[in-house]
C-alpha cells in the first residue's frame, strides 16, 4: 500500500490561511491533491490538519481526513518527519506491515507535477534508498557566494574560489520543497532526509518556487500564469 500524506496546518503566520488561499483560481492545496491523484501512485491520499475548514475542503477535493492532527504537532516549530510518522500510525496502525512507501506532498506546492512524483517513486525502489525527494540546481555557483559583514563590507564565504571560473565549479542543488517519498521505516524511525541514504529527482528551476512571503506568492502566480500550468 502506498500513501500520499499532505501536511496542512491552519496556523500560517506570514500568509494567513495559505494552504487554502486561492492561487490562480483554485485553493492552494488543490494542486497537491490533484497531482497525487493524477500520478496514479497512491492507494490513499491523506491530509493531516488541525483545522476543520481545511479538512472539509480536502474532503470535497477527494482526499481523506481520517483524523485531526493534535495541537502538539501543529505549532510553528513542528518538523515534517514527526507529522508524517504520526499520520502513518493514525492511518495504518493495523496495517503497517502492508505499507510499501509513503510520500509527503506539501500543501503549498502548486508547481508539483504528477510525472515527477511517479519518477521519484520509481527511483526510490530502483536505488533502494530511504528517501527520494524533489531538488533543483542553484542558479549561481554557491562557491562564489558573498556575505555582508557587520561593517557593511563584502567578503566571500570561500575566497579560494575567487579566480575559479563558474563553469569549473561543481554544481550544487537544493530541496525543491514539493514532495518526499520515504520507506515506512525511514519515516517512523525519524531518519533525516538530506543524507547519503537518500536520492533526488531533479526538477527544472522554472518549476520551483518557495512560497513563504506575499512577495513569493506574487512571483509564483506570475510564473504559474506564464507557464500556463492551469
Image (spheres, rainbow, N blue to C red):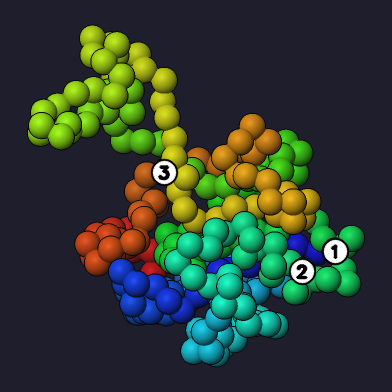
> Can you identify the residue that label 2 sits on?
89
Q: In which quarter of the image is residue 219?
A: bottom left
Question: Image point 62% across, 78% down: which residue?
Answer: 70
Callout 1 environment at 10 Å: few (<14), some (14 to 19), or many (20+)?
A: some
Question: Image point 45% across, 66% down: which residue?
Answer: 76
Above or below 81: residue 92? below
N-term-proximal mark, 3 vs 2: 2
Between circles 3 and 2, the one closer to the viewer is 2
Callout 2 environment at 10 Å: few (<14), some (14 to 19), or many (20+)?
A: few
Q: In which quarter of the image is residue 157?
A: top left
| Residue lying farthest to the left in this orientation | 152
Measured in 3D between alpha carbons, the distance from the residue under mark 2 to the one under mark 1, in whole angstroms, is: 8 Å
| Residue lying farthest to the front in this orientation | 150
Q: Is residue 94 left or right of residue 5?
A: right
Measured in 3D between alpha carbons, the distance from the residue under mark 3 to the one under mark 1, in whole angstroms, is: 35 Å
Viewport quadrant of the C terminus: bottom left
Above or below 124: residue 211? below
Callout 3 environment at 10 Å: few (<14), some (14 to 19), or many (20+)?
A: few
Assign a secondary structure to mark 1: helix
> Can you identify the residue that label 1 sits on?
96
Indicate the position of residue 139 as horizontal and vertical percent values: 31, 35
Q: Is residue 34 left or right of residue 173?
A: right
> Between residues 118 and 51, which one lies in front from this camera angle?
51
Question: Image point 82% across, 61% down: which residue?
Answer: 99
Measured in 3D between alpha carbons, the distance from the residue under mark 3 to the one under mark 2, in whole angstroms, is: 34 Å
Disc marking residue 204:
3
Assign a secondary structure to mark 3: loop
Above or below 117: residue 70? below
Indicate the position of residue 126 as horizontal and vertical percent values: 74, 39
Q: In which quarter of the image is residue 158?
A: top left
Viewport quadrant of the N terminus: bottom right
Q: Do the residues labelled 2 and 1 touch (CB within 8 Å)?
A: yes
Amino acid at each position: 500500500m502506498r500513501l500520499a500524506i499532505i501536511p496542512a496546518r491552519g496556523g500560517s503566520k506570514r500568509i494567513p490561511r495559505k494552504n487554502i488561499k486561492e492561487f490562480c483560481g483554485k485553493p492552494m492545496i488543490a494542486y497537491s491533491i490533484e497531482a497525487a491523484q493524477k500520478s496514479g501512485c497512491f492507494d490513499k491520499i491523506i491530509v493531516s490538519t488541525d483545522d476543520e475548514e481545511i479538512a472539509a475542503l480536502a474532503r470535497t477535493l477527494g482526499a481523506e481526513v481520517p483524523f485531526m492532527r493534535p495541537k502538539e504537532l501543529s505549532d510553528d516549530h513542528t518538523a515534517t518527519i514527526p507529522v508524517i510518522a504520526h499520520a502513518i500510525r493514525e492511518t495504518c496502525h493495523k496495517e503497517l506491515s502492508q505499507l510499501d512507501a509513503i510520500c509527503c506532498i506539501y500543501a503549498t506546492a502548486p508547481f508539483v507535477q504528477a510525472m515527477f512524483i511517479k519518477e521519484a517513486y520509481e527511483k526510490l525502489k530502483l536505488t533502494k534508498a530511504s528517501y527520494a525527494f524533489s531538488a533543483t540546481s542553484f542558479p549561481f555557483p554557491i562557491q562564489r557566494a558573498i556575505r555582508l559583514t557587520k561593517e557593511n563590507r563584502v567578503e566571500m564565504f570561500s575566497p579560494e574560489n575567487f579566480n575559479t571560473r563558474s563553469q569549473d565549479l561543481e554544481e550544487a542543488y537544493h530541496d525543491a520543497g514539493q514532495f518526499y517519498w520515504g520507506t515506512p521505516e525511514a519515516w517512523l524511525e525519524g531518519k533525516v532526509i538530506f543524507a547519503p541514504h537518500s536520492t533526488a529527482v531533479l526538477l527544472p528551476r522554472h518549476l520551483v518556487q518557495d512560497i513563504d512571503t506575499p512577495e513569493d506568492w506574487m512571483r509564483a502566480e506570475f510564473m504559474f500564469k506564464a507557464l500556463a500550468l492551469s
